Every structure is written in structure tokens, then in C-alpha cells.
Image (cartoon, rainbow, N blue to C red):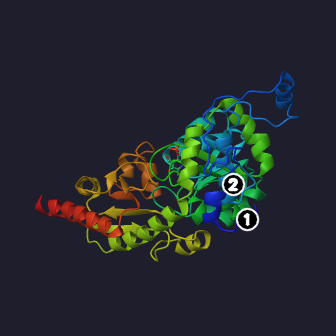
Amino acid sequence: MTEFHHPATALIHGGIDRTPFGETSEAIFLTSGFVYDSAEQAEATFLGTASHYQYTRFGNPTITALERRLAILEGAEACRVTATGMAAVHGALLCQLKTGDRLVASRALFGSCHWIVSTLLPRYGIDIAFVDAADLEGWRRAFATPAAMVLLETPSNPMLDIVDLRAVSDLAHQAGALVVVDNVFATPLLQRPRDFGADIVVYSATKHIDGQGRVLGGAVLGAKQWVEEVLQPFLRNTGPALSPFNAWTLLKSLETLELRVRAACASAAILADTLALNPAVRRVWYPTRRDHPQQELAMRQMSAGGTLVTFEVHGGKEAAFRALNALRLVAISNNLGDARSLVTHPATTTHMRIGAEERARLGITDGTIRLSVGLEDVRDLQADLAQALAAASSTRAAA
Ligand SMILES: Cc1ncc(COP(=O)(O)O)c(C=O)c1O
């Protein structure tokens, strides 16, 4: 696919396989099955000696176009898409792991990923070791014992911790582990984990890939042999297939991914600086800001800081709730990566179930707020955040 030298081009042209009608944009094959010209062709297809679509749970032309486009973008040999991001994470782990295996995981994981690692996998006799994202010594200790896989997220949700992808991948490989990276916050445009040694990359396509809050989706990318021989049989037989309609929606969204992500990143960097100057704000986390403890590492791995900004307000939960409730433009939602700016209070929503002790360990306080920056004019976002933070602190002063 040498004609795609730059991501913006691949995002528009990648993966298209036109029908004889010569349609300009991708067709939707909204069909559950496919017919055969003969019984012999059906037999040959099932034997694997003929190539033909069989059933949309196994594959579908619209879904294949999305998988091809994502693989080109990621620089990966192969991709399979799934109905949700969690189906992608769960499929990538469960297709590989077996009883007696050991999984090393970053402690800073999205809530449902944390549940899979801490609750589901141990039920099947898989040993788990958690490591703090930024603790290289901790990673080194964890990989002193052989492991089958490692799951990590960088930047992490919501504290934007950065994992050193090169160092952790090298340690993991010495311990015999495959490295799985949840790259949702960075997107394939800002960071390609496989360039730093990771083996498998997973996405919630629900986030920036759709980017307009319409459909759920997921993706797993890796080496062709692993995808075809290990992942594909698991997906084909367990059935977390993406709807062809959702695949078509995601293909359409990919055409604007670069424009959307770059615009939201530019606004996020401005808002991080604006928030840091607001007297109601105690602290701001943004990967490329000078006060981020891992700024240098973030800039080595990522081409921009991302579309999420995390900040802590003075006054804990009450002040955080007052600020959220005073917002007029930015909506309260646990989703992210949308064209609309969204704000969430992790301690009472996305990270409620992990408990206060684990939250404290991750640095999530009752005043922590996660802002997913959208595509509105940044001046309107600045004004909305300023008035909400002023309302929150003036109510506090009056109380
Ligand atoms: C980092 C991360 N990984 C995985 C997921 C799961 O994706 P989905 O909601 O599409 O299942 C999410 C969000 O929900 C997420 O933020």
C-alpha cells in the first residue's frame, strides 16, 4: 500500500474495494449471509480452498474495508473489528490466555478493563500482577517472572499517566509476554505503539474513530499470523461482530479523523494552560505541559498531547459538582472523544467501582475532573469553563 504515504490520504482512500457499480464512497453490505453459485463453491469455501464471504459473523466487505483502512493507519499487518472496545480488549486477551498463564497489567486501566483483569481472568486460573504505570522498577520486578501477556493504557484514563512503551515492551519480551496496548487516548494518529515494540494494539472505536458520538465499535491490530490463527477463531466462534452499518459509519468518520484530532488537540493544549491559571483549579494534567511529570517521555512517544485534559478543583466533590452543574456548553457525560466537549467526575462515575483506596493510589481525588475536548470554538469553551469555575467558587465563598 505504498500509495498512502501520509495518514490523511489513507484515511480517505485506504481499504476501498469497489463493486462493479463503481460507487465513489464505500457501499454498505447490510447482509447477514452470502450465497454460493454451487454446492461445490460452498464446500470449497468452508475447506478454505476458495475465497468467498460466508456469514457476517466471520467477515463482510464493509467490515473488511474498515479493517484494511485501520491496519494501513496503524502500520499493522492485520486488523479485526468488534462490536465495542471492550469486546476488542476482552477478545485480544481471552484468545491468547489459558489457565496457569500470568498477565501483567498497568494499574491505571479503564474501569471495565480493570474488572476483566482483576475479576474475570482470575476465575479462569490466570495469575495477575498489577504495576503502577510510571514505575519502571515495578515493571522490571513484575517481569522477573515469566508472563504470557501485558495489558497497559497510555496515556491512562483519567490521570494521563504515561507508560514507557519501549522499556516495558523490551522487558515484557524478555519475560516471554505479548504486549497489548489500549491506545484509545492517543489515537493511531498521535502514537503508534507497535513502533515502540508493542505487539497488539486495541481501540474503542466508539471514541475518536467514530468521534461524533454515534456508534460503538472496537478494533484489534497485530501481526497477520496472530490475527488469523489466534484472534480470528476466537472472534468467529464467540461472535462479538460489528454491524456492517456501524462499520460504514466508522469508515465515514475516519475520513475526518486527522482534522478532528488535530483541532481538538490544539484546543486541549490551550484549555490546559487556561485552566492552570484559574484560581479555582489546584492542578492540571496534560501530557505535553512542562509540569507533567513525564512530559519528556510523552513527547518521545506522542506527536501531540491528546484531546483530554484532567484537572483538580479546590474544594473536593462539592466544588467539582458545582462546577459541572454550572457548565452551559460542555455536557456531563462519561463518554469521550466526541465532537462535543464532555466532562466527567471520575470518582463518582467511571472509577467509582474501583474503590477509594485504588483511586487514591491512582491519584484520582474527589476534586478531579476529566475534560474531553471537542470541536467547538476554543473561545466558547474557555468562557464556559471560566464561568462555571467562577460560579463554583463564588457559591463556596458565599456558603
Ligand atoms: C481506555 C478505554 N478502553 C476501552 C474502553 C471501552 O470501549 P467501549 O465503550 O467501546 O466498549 C473505553 C471506553 O469506554 C476506554 O476509555
How many numbered marks have been drawn onto this rendered protein structure? 2
Q: Say few, some or many: other residues with alpha carbon within 10 Å of mark 2 (under 14 / 14 to 19 / 20 or more).
A: many
**At which x and y percent is residue 95?**
71, 39
Q: Residue at x 82, y 29 (%)?
A: 46
Relative to 171, is 44 above or below? above
Whether residue 155 appears in this view of the structure is no
* Amino acid beneath label 2: Ala
Q: Residue at x 44, y 54 (%)?
A: 338
The quadrant in which the N terminus is found is bottom right
Whether residue 247 appears in this view of the structure is yes
Most foreground residue, 356 or 59:
59
Query: Where does label 2 land, which residue?
Result: 71
Relative to 206, is 385 above or below? below
Query: Where does label 1 land, which residue?
Result: 3
Whole-number angstrom distance, CA of label 2 to CA of label 1: 14 Å
In the rendered image, the residue lying farthest to the top is 39
Q: Is residue 340 left or right of residue 50?
A: left
* Amino acid beneath label 1: Glu
